Amino acid sequence: MDQSMEGESKVKGQWSLIDCDVHCTPLYPDEIVSRLPAYFRTQGLVLPGGPGLPHPTGVRRVDARGPQGEPAGSLPEKMREQLLDAYGVDFAVLIEAKLLTVGVHPDTHFGNEIARAHNDWLREKWLPADPRFLGSMLINLLDPTAAAAEIRRVAGSERIVQVVMTSATRIPLGDRIYWPIYEAACEAGLPVAVHPGAEGKGVAGQFSAGFPASYLEWHTNLSQNFMAQLTSLLCRGAMSQFPELRFVMVEGGFGWVPHLLWRLDKNWKGLRSTVPWLDRPPSEYVLERVRFTSQPVEEPPSNDQLLELLHMMQAERTLMFSSDYPHWDNDSPLRAFPRLPEEMKERIFWKNAAELYRL
Amino acid sequence: MDQSMEGESKVKGQWSLIDCDVHCTPLYPDEIVSRLPAYFRTQGLVLPGGPGLPHPTGVRRVDARGPQGEPAGSLPEKMREQLLDAYGVDFAVLIEAKLLTVGVHPDTHFGNEIARAHNDWLREKWLPADPRFLGSMLINLLDPTAAAAEIRRVAGSERIVQVVMTSATRIPLGDRIYWPIYEAACEAGLPVAVHPGAEGKGVAGQFSAGFPASYLEWHTNLSQNFMAQLTSLLCRGAMSQFPELRFVMVEGGFGWVPHLLWRLDKNWKGLRSTVPWLDRPPSEYVLERVRFTSQPVEEPPSNDQLLELLHMMQAERTLMFSSDYPHWDNDSPLRAFPRLPEEMKERIFWKNAAELYRL
């Protein structure tokens, strides 16, 4: 956790750096609303609210606001100064995290139009602003047919490197209803990223065991949705059905990955007759085609334990650095990890992402 | 995973052995029904059914059935022969796992009566059958006032060593509605055990992300409920409110423990102003007062990784051996773990349980 990156060295050294989770956001709602069809323009940008669990300091860094108090993440030039130039970021993968809640919006017509407006806004405002910005196209997973059509509409745009959708669902992501999305993503050669934040909102189901009661509990539980989604993607055969399908688990933590893969492989050995489409241990699909972003880095009591964890999850294949700028708990690329073996550092800080996104 | 314990050495050596999760079950429904009030006796033993996810071989070992095909776990003498004598088990903590679903039964009157009948049955049939049997009193967590009264009714019975309830809930276990249960458990000096199996049944909410679609997915996801419950117990202040409260997380896996404690401690550092009752890092409460049973042992690709995991979770304080006899994936005490350091082995196989249960 690193509330401010100020005061750190502005020079990252000679290594390259790809930041896989950076949050841009509209400067004002009309940036999106003006791109909606007339019917929805009159309704305004009403998105599903949260479950009522306040964050004591707000979720975004106060010092990332613009000179006139513009929202953190709303000004390309501020992001350039505070993130890209400050740390020598070679590429920043942009994800608009507030509009992700279209994936839990009860009105699928509206959700589809917001996704479409977002994608046009991203391509018109953000991607031209700096060649280091890479874009994530938003889809509304509640309407898989429309989502697949949107992927096909936007695919091929310069520097759009992935599809993104919310990790909060009422039906887990492995289910066949989503397969048109995966078919379109594979056709476009794009990985599918999953990002948290809509948990407990809109039509998303509750978490395991019920609703969390504080931001601390809510935030801690976010990882569980990622475990459930990954389990579902494997067990329902989505990863087998689409051999080109790649997933990016963004901001869901990664300390749980070894445990989940061990548990899945063990259960698969005993129960594989029930999932004939899984013809190899589930972990193999993950190691080959699922990637995890680093922020928030779990902080074991010793660096040795963090290194052991990285070894257990084969981080040299599976982990990609992310800052989560400008969120409250963003990680600095200079401080997020202890001293790593050179090869692992290169893999985490840029090579894994460069390969995934074909940069 | 060990489908059969047959053919293994019948001698465990000189060390003691406490098995913290052994499943007894009624021989026929009338063992319970006959102990119900007249009104419920006429209804029969109808419990919430599962979500429709078949296990290919059935959930219980076929070779644990009685000579006339009696259900696995229904005959004390069979359990004595196949588990206690075969492995030299000094104590076996009995948990009736099917009736646990009273905790998700929509009729709380019925749930309360089943819990009461179960506790009488346990004390009358099972505990007198062998001095090595220890009992878990069942409660219906959907009626905390009645559950607290039941704890007070049964507490003090010989060899009743804990309270047990289901890990499946619609409101997480830290919530204040359950505090009468914890007050009564502390008063009785008994730990509270949580056991899976009712997930997706009755009035339990769905899992993270939606409903699982296969037994493999369902079983893999069970751990998530334990993470959510533990998080809730800490974040809502139940562990702080009751300094004597001890929990046993049974059959929920343990590979996830290090990750969850790291994540909780990190989040607590940033958000502790929102949980003033947590005046220490959450992990400290867990290390002191929460215990985990071992089965199903996660199976990392190397023994070194399992030993690292045990080290990360301070297994010499937190882990207690369990076989889960007679379930399909039960663990043999002779094979569940690789060679462990002597001190850790003693702690896991008997000392941690002996301390917790004051044996």
Image (tube, coloured by chain):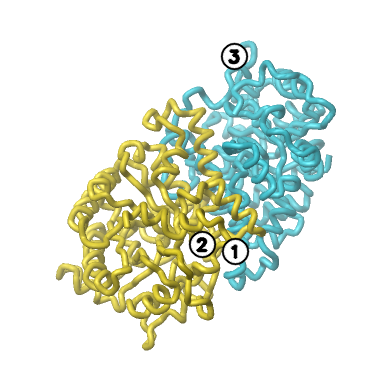
Chain colours: A yellow, B cyan
Q: Earlier in the sequence, mark 3 or mark 1?
A: 3
Say which element carries label 1.
helix
| Residues behind callouts 3 and 1 on a single chain | yes
Task: Give the label, 3 or 1, closer to the camera.
Answer: 1
A20 up-or-down from B200: above or below: below
Is the residue marked by circle 2 packed among few (<14), some (14-19), or many (20+) residues within 10 Å? many
Camera-side residue: B38 or A95?
A: A95
Q: Amino acid at mark 3?
A: Gly
Q: Would residue B156 be found to the left or right of residue A316 on screen?
A: right
Residue sitting farthest toward the bottom = A68
Q: CB atoms at circles 2 and 1 under 8 Å apart? A: yes
Whether discs 2 and 1 lie on one chain: the answer is no
Q: Secondary structure at mark 2?
A: loop
Check the residue under mark 1 and report the chain it is in. Answer: B
Figure check: A219 above or below B21 = below
In front: label 3 or label 2: 2
Q: A190 or B201: nearer the eye?
A: A190
> Disc 2 versus disc 1: distance between alpha carbons?
9 Å
Neighbourhood count class around disc 1 (C-alpha, 10 Å): few under 14, some 14–19, many 20 upward: many
Question: On what subunit does the disc labeled 2 rest?
Answer: A
Point 70% across, 62% down: residue:
B240
